[in-house]
Image: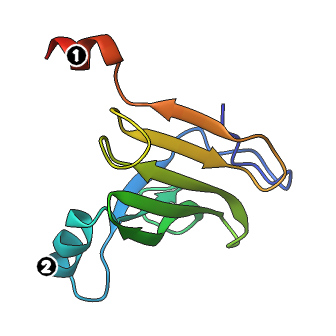
Amino acid sequence: MVSFSDASGPAPSAVYVERELPPGGTSAYLAARRGGARSIGFWADDQRRERVAAVVPLSAGGGVARFQVLGAHGELIGTLTREKALRGRGLRTRWTVHQPDGPEAVKFKGRIIWWWMW
């Protein structure tokens, strides 16, 4: 469960997700996406008046992409790292979540038995 409340009011019941385009527009977004970088905004309303959080790229290249998760006021919530399959650490894509003062969480995409059967 993720709570978007900062204790100053109730947390939103729904969050609107929007892909954010870089300054170069759609072509710049597609070029960045090929490298694994993308920016996503989370909004409390469909009019985009109140930002709840954002995921912004730190670096991307060589099959590894790093993202920062920022809160409504730009504060760091955590860092995400995505390592593509067969690039360094293993056979499956690996997602790692680093929290500033918390434990590290790791998740792998898919199950190895199905990758082997495929």
Q: The residue tagged with tag 2: helix, strand or loop?
A: helix
Judge left or right: residue 26 versus residue 8: left
Q: Residue at x 32, y 64 (%)?
A: 62
Q: Nearer the viewer, mark 1 or mark 2?
A: 1
Q: Nearer the viewer, residue 11 or 33?
A: 33
Going from the N terminus, do you reach mark 1 or mark 2 first? 2
Q: Quadrant of residue 105?
A: top right
In which quadrant will I find the N terminus?
Answer: top right
Vertical position of residue 59 compared to residue 105: above or below: below
The image's mark for residue 27 is 2
Disc 1/disc 2 C-alpha distance (Å): 36 Å
The residue drawn where x is 55% and y is 53% is 80
Q: Amino acid at mark 1?
A: Trp
Q: Residue under circle 1?
A: 116
| Image location of residue 8, percent across then percent down | 85, 56
The image shows a total of numbered marks equal to 2
**Residue shown at the point (26%, 72%) measured from the top left:** 32
Is the residue marked by circle 1 packed among few (<14), some (14-19), or many (20+) residues within 10 Å?
few
